[in-house]
Image (cartoon, rainbow, N blue to C red):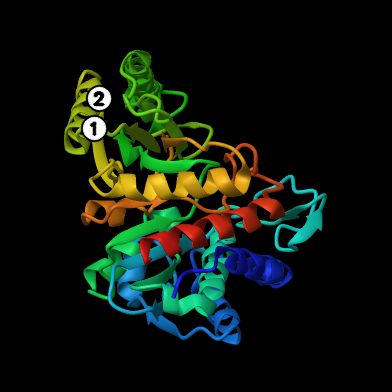
């Protein structure tokens, strides 16, 4: 049996209204991370999938494992569809989202549609690709005889905290071992690499004293100011060392959280801050971490009476291109050219995501889906996040045709 491409694309068009309703139902169930209580959303997603005829495996992650990554509950979902002997292709999207924050012009959980776009937290990053992948698979089901191999939907819930109890947990538990993986999209093109990320918590320790006699204490805040000068001075050299991969950019360092002190009239005895160091694929993460900690300790040691403690919060390794990835890229670009009428790029992204766990396991992996054309375009992680519904439909066609090629 030969795949009927026209029939496949017509089937996707026929399901478009149902697909939009499916996505809206996902957006209306909050799954903010933090706090990361995401099992209720998994239950809702599983029910929606089962209503469409899918068999859904529910894989709850043990509470202690969930708590270790700072979340409250995680249930990962797997849908498997076997068409015969052949490669296994995993499609992964995450259902946890950043909290909505302030400044919305619509209800962040309302899934309102305006001017051809749906608005809501997670509608672009990345609940959209629950819908992309599920409806691509449903549409292909009617031409099962033309396919050889298997498809798995991996719907996970911890991308915002690193993916360690999502994709990594599925792989480590032996629940899946795909030959290829396509993860939720972050751009209009095909993403082939991404930055790594190091989060450190730094505690600068001094000695409290009455503000009337500051010389009797050791000011942790003043010491932190000097330390921050050292750290920001280090960033001046970053732009001179860009990644060779397009779209990645250069290393970056940002201090995103800071707190400390006892009271207005007390010399602060402790200041704690967290920093984010972006790691380009050419860098060695362990060397970056060791060098940064050494610089922090040296800067504090130069100030009498101060101490410092440094704790790793997160180390997400860069995703780098591996052999076999080029096959996915070529297929996605070819079908995107057909559906969109334009050439889409294959490049890296400066963010990091959970797709790296598939790639690190030796599985050729790319990111592609409805997702945002860019995070800025879609207001990803900002107020009024939205998704063009035409992009949802087009991406569904592109991934369905790509899967048909992989399983031909």
Between residue 267 and residue 336, name the one nearer to us.
336
Q: Secondary structure at mark 2?
A: helix
Q: Residue furthest front?
A: 1
Between residue 332 and residue 51, name the one nearer to us.
332
Q: Residues within 10 Å of mark 2 (few under 14, many from 20)?
A: many
* Left or right of 163, for residue 41: right
| Residue 307 x/y as whole percent | 23, 32
Task: Kindly identify the residue that appears in the image at 60 percent across and 53 percent down.
Answer: 124
Rendered image: mark on residue 332: none
Could you tell me if the residues under marks 2 and 1 are in contact, i.e. CB atoms within 8 Å?
yes
Q: Is residue 355 visible?
A: yes
* Left or right of 341, for residue 294: left
Task: Kindly identify the residue that appears in the image at 31 percent across and 31 percent down.
Answer: 280
Q: CA distance from mark 2 to mark 1?
A: 7 Å
- Residue 309: name its quadrant: top left
Q: Secondary structure at mark 1?
A: strand
Q: Name which of mark 2 and mark 1 comes first in the sequence.
A: 2
Q: Residues within 10 Å of mark 1 (few under 14, many from 20)?
A: some
| Residue 100 x/y as whole percent | 64, 53
Quadrant containing the C terminus is bottom left
Between residue 303 and residue 90, name the one nearer to us.
90
* Left or right of 6, for residue 55: left
| Residue 114 x/y as whole percent | 82, 53
Residue tagged 2: 300
Quadrant containing the N terminus is bottom left
How many tags in the picture? Answer: 2
Task: Kindly identify the residue that appears in the image at 31 percent across and 73 percent down.
Answer: 64
Residue tagged 1: 307
86 up-or-down from 193: above or below = below
| Residue 170 x/y as whole percent | 30, 70
């Amino acid at each position: 049996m030969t795949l009927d491409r026209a029939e496949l694309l017509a089937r996707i068009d026929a399901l478009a209204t149902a697909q939009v309703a499916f996505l809206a139902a996902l957006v209306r169930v909050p799954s903010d991370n933090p706090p990361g209580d995401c099992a209720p959303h998994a239950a809702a997603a599983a029910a929606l999938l089962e209503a469409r005829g899918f068999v859904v495996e529910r894989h709850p992650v043990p509470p202690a494992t969930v708590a270790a990554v700072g979340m409250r509950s995680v249930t990962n979902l797997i849908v498997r569809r076997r068409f015969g002997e052949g490669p296994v292709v995993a499609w992964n999207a995450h259902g946890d989202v950043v909290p909505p924050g302030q400044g919305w012009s619509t209800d962040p959980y309302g899934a309102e549609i305006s001017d051809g776009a749906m608005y809501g937290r997670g509608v672009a990053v990345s609940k959209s690709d629950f819908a992309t992948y599920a409806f691509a698979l449903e549409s292909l089901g009617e031409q099962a005889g033309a396919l050889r191999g298997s498809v798995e939907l991996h719907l996970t819930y911890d991308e915002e905290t690193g993916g360690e109890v999502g994709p990594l947990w599925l792989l480590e538990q032996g629940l899946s071992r795909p030959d290829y993986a396509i993860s939720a999209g972050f751009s209009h093109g095909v993403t082939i690499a991404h930055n790594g990320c190091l989060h450190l918590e730094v505690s600068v320790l001094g000695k409290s004293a009455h503000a009337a006699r500051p010389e009797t204490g050791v000011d942790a805040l003043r010491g932190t100011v000097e330390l921050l000068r050292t750290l920001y001075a280090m960033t001046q050299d970053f732009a001179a060392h860009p990644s060779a991969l397009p779209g990645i950019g250069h290393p970056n360092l940002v201090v995103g959280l800071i707190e400390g002190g006892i009271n207005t009239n007390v010399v602060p005895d402790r200041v704690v801050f967290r920093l984010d160091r972006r790691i380009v694929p050419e860098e060695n993460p362990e060397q970056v971490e060791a060098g940064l900690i050494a610089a922090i300790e040296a800067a504090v040691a130069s100030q009498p009476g101060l101490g410092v403690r440094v704790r790793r919060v997160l180390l997400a390794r860069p995703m780098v291109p591996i052999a076999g990835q080029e096959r996915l890229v070529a297929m996605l670009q070819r079908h995107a050219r057909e559906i969109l009428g334009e050439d889409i790029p294959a490049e890296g992204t400066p963010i990091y995501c959970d797709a790296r766990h598939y790639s690190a396991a030796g599985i050729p992996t790319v990111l592609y889906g409805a997702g945002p054309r860019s995070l800025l375009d879609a207001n990803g992680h900002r107020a009024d996040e939205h998704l063009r519904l035409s992009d949802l439909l087009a991406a569904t066609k592109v991934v369905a045709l790509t899967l048909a090629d992989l399983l031909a």
